[in-house]
């Protein structure tokens, strides 16, 4: 005999499929949804349905967008000589928040991860190379995560792109702002030293 | 809730929750364990680069009898292999080392020899690049340490010595078979590859690399050993298919 009525059980099962949501949290969320006003619950369902049916991948940069090409690819003020390569669409927001970068983007859809079976064929690399063949792009900024997978992807990309005569740069890696040097480990400190700049 | 301090190698980590990491590590004293490192994915994490793949670390963690997962409190880097993994092929070999080690060791099974083998292999890849010899060394020794390696010189069925003739194997068979005892579908392993196998089991990795054995024999040994490992793991290795036909070929 199930613990809850069938519709509630189904809702809990669906919520459990979300990342980071376990059985207890799914149960708590399900009962929260049952307690809230019907219009609020329906608004949540509508938002999920709208997002799922209206959002797609940009055919140029693979960002998630409601209009294809996305607003970054079509923006008249964007600098078309630079492309910033990121792993996932949500990484774009972290860069946009700085308001320091006005170039284009390219979303790889992940990073080289042998342990998860992700090799170069699973990433959007061909479309990036195609974008570079036009000759308008002068610099590629690789903004993959500063971990083993991100570094391997960055090195792989640089070997792939450099023969095309495009400048390849990597975002700075090292000590985070507001932290103390004494707590930095050897690798972080070494990366910070490697990436030092003139003042 | 006692705080334990030990030497460990990070085998794998997964994102958990908002900014945490679930880490699988090989503790030199207690075997393979899994634990949670709170806030490890945040920019100002106190763990820094210590939880990257195959990092050799000193680890402090809390353990509770009723819980499977330990709580990782602090890590200090002894040796990092992050720079090695910038090379894609080298990264695949290290990922395979990690995947095999995690799959063959049971939880809390003390494995000091495997611990030393993983470190030796990672250092070998750092020093010599993605060498097929280093991979063959790791794979064959892992099979040996698991207790799954039969004689490389004698037919396991009739006992006949096989020195200059090919031997035959399948992952499920207990050892190598001679040309007369073999089944038709069995794969051959050449005398030169078996000679390399004997050198791997009797010498050091440094000496072996100085002798510069052939890539074909090294790949033959790796393939033989990985077949046996996959048979005992009862699943295919995810990283093996990325090795392609062989490393550096």
Image (cartoon, rainbow, N blue to C red):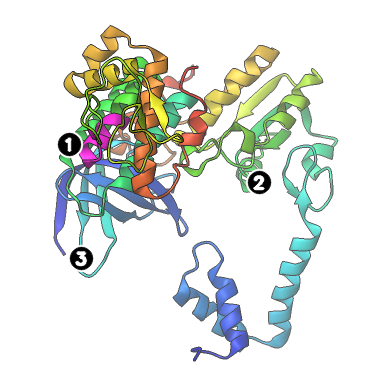
Chain assignment, label 2: A
- Can you say whether B47 is above or below A27 in the image? above
**Residue A35 placement: quadrant:** bottom right
Q: State whether discs 1 and 2 lie on one chain.
A: no
Whole-angstrom CA distance, mark 3 to mark 1, is: 27 Å
Residue A85 coordinates in the image, percent (x, y):
64, 33
The label nearer to you, 3 versus 1, is 1
Chain assignment, label 1: B
**Outermost residue, top side:** B211
In this orientation, does residue A179 appear?
Answer: no
- Mark 1: secondary structure: helix
Whole-angstrom CA distance, mark 2 to mark 3, is: 39 Å
Whole-angstrom CA distance, mark 1 to mark 2, is: 43 Å
Residue at image mark 1? B113
Residue at image coords 50%, 44%: A116
Residue at image mark 2? A89
Residue B64 coordinates in the image, percent (x, y):
20, 65
- Can you say whether A15 is above or below A63 in the image? below
The crowding category of the residue bearing disc 2, from other C-alpha atoms within 10 Å (few below 14, some 14 to 19, many at least 20), is: many
- Mark 2: secondary structure: helix
Q: For this view, does A134 lie left or right of residue B57?
A: right
Residue B29 coordinates in the image, percent (x, y):
14, 46
Chain assignment, label 3: B
Residue at image coords 63%, 48%: A90
Q: Magenta region: which residues?
A: B139-150
- Mark 3: secondary structure: loop
**Residue A33 placement: quadrant:** bottom right
Question: Any mark on residue B64, and which?
Answer: 3
Residue B229 coordinates in the image, percent (x, y):
34, 40
Residue A119 forms part of the magenta stretch: no
């Amino acid at each position: 005999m199930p613990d809850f009525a069938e519709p509630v059980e189904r809702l809990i099962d669906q919520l459990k499929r979300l990342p980071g949501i376990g059985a207890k949290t799914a149960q708590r969320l399900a009962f929260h949804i049952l307690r809230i006003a019907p219009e609020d619950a329906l608004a949540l369902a509508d938002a999920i349905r709208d997002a799922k049916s209206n959002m797609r991948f940009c055919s140029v940069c693979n960002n998630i967008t409601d209009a294809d090409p996305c607003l970054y690819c079509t923006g008249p003020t964007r600098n078309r000589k630079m492309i910033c390569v990121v792993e996932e669409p949500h990484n774009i927001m972290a860069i946009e928040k700085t308001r320091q970068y006005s170039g284009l983007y390219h979303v790889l859809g992940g990073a080289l991860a042998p342990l998860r079976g992700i090799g170069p064929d699973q990433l959007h690399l061909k479309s990036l190379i195609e974008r570079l063949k036009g000759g308008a792009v002068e610099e590629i900024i690789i903004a993959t995560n500063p971990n083993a997978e991100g570094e391997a992807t960055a090195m792989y990309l640089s070997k792939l792109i450099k023969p095309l005569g495009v400048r390849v740069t990597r975002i700075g890696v090292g000590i985070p702002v507001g932290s103390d040097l004494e707590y930095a480990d050897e690798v972080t400190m070494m990366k910070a030293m490697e990436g030092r700049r003139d003042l | 809730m006692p705080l334990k301090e030990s030497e460990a190698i990070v085998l794998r980590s997964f994102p958990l929750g908002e900014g945490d990491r679930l880490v699988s590590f090989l503790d030199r004293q207690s075997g393979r364990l899994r634990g949670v490192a709170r806030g490890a994915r945040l920019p100002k994490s106190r763990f820094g680069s210590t939880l990257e793949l195959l990092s050799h670390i000193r680890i402090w963690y809390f353990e509770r009898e009723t819980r499977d997962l330990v709580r990782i409190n602090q890590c200090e880097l002894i040796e990092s292999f992050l720079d090695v993994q910038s090379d894609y092929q080298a990264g695949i070999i290290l990922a395979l080392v990690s995947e095999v080690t995690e799959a063959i060791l049971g939880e809390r099974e003390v494995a000091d020899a495997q611990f030393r083998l993983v470190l030796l292999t990672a250092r070998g890849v750092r020093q010599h690049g993605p060498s097929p010899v280093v991979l063959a060394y790791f794979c064959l020794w892992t099979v040996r340490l698991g207790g799954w390696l039969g004689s490389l010189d004698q037919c396991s069925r009739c006992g006949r010595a096989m020195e200059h003739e090919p031997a035959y194997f399948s992952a499920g068979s207990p050892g190598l078979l001679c040309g007369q005892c073999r089944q038709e579908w069995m794969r051959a392993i050449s005398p030169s590859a078996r000679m390399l196998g004997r050198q791997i089991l009797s010498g050091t990795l440094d000496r072996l690399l100085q002798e510069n054995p052939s890539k074909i024999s090294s790949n033959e040994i790796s393939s033989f050993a990985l077949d046996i490992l996959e048979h005992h793991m009862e699943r295919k290795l995810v990283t093996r298919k990325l090795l392609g036909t062989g490393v550096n070929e």
